Amino acid sequence: MEISGKVAVVTGSGSGIGRGIALSLARRGASVVVADIDEDGGRATMDEIVDGTGVAAFARTDVTRTEDLAAMLALAAGTFGGVDILVNNAGVVCGEPLWPRTDPAVLAAQVSVNLTAVIVGTRLAIEPLHARGGGVVVNTASIGALLPLEEEPGYSATKAGVVMFTRACAGLAASHGVRVNAVLPGLVDTPLLAKSGDGTREADWAGVARQFMPMLTPDDVADVVVELIEDDTAAGAYRVVGELPDFVAAML
């Protein structure tokens, strides 16, 4: 798919990976709906796009609410005429106290944000994408889907679910002209990682991972998202972002 002239919706784009993806798509000529529960962060992303002569709108979106996801897509239709690209990017870690002492309510919220919202968001987008002659969904998973995080098993489980959901949607390319794919980043320098411990600092597991995994930037992830959007042969595919150490790759 040629990105220029298309309409993209990116969840969790108020910061981090989502902001990087939104900015990258805008630079390539897409009109972008910045969707985030963080209104200040979302509007900052929107302003950065507009200041760079791009086109953007903001939708305050709690991805755990079906009505918010529907409103986000409706805003894209009402403002820009439809939607061609959906990036289900919003995600959370539980943080401390780590497993198995994690608060059950926090675990439930993590499943809702990381997995349920991806499934429901994709479902809501199928008809609007099909109506435009087809489109692309890219889901942000994680290397944690393949390499278990023992202190954040809920994160690994939800991201593994995103990968399997993505693979199971491969048939939509033939039936609806909708290609669903996923990216699996490793460690990315984002506010989420910086607050993965007690909410003010990095978790110990992240510090250990830094010793053997390269630190990625949001732009690294955005580049692979762009590749998946532009590659018309990619459907039900998932791609690891960045190079992994040999011993890590051997575990996958």
Image: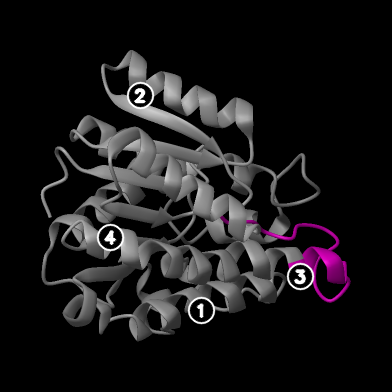
User: In the displayed structure, does residue 245 sit left or right of residue 104?
Assistant: left
Where is residue 101? Give x, y as percent: 89, 71
Q: Quadrant of residue 190?
A: top right
Label 2 to label 3: alpha-carbon separation: 34 Å
Residue 16 versus residue 44 in the image, above or below? below
- Of badges 3 and 4, the one in the foreground is 4
Q: Which residue is mark 3?
A: 108
Image quarter of the C terminus: bottom left
- Residue furthest out toward the top: 51
Label 3 to label 4: alpha-carbon separation: 30 Å
- The tag on residue 49 is 2
Q: Which stretch is magenta?
A: 90-108
What amino acid is labelled 3 in the image?
Answer: Ala
Q: Is residue 21 visible?
A: no
Q: Which residue is mark 1?
A: 160
Label 2 to label 1: alpha-carbon separation: 32 Å
Q: Nearer the viewer, residue 16 or 115?
A: 115
What amino acid is labelled 1 in the image?
Answer: Ala
- Local SS, label 3: helix
User: In the displayed structure, does residue 247 sit left or right of residue 36?
Assistant: left
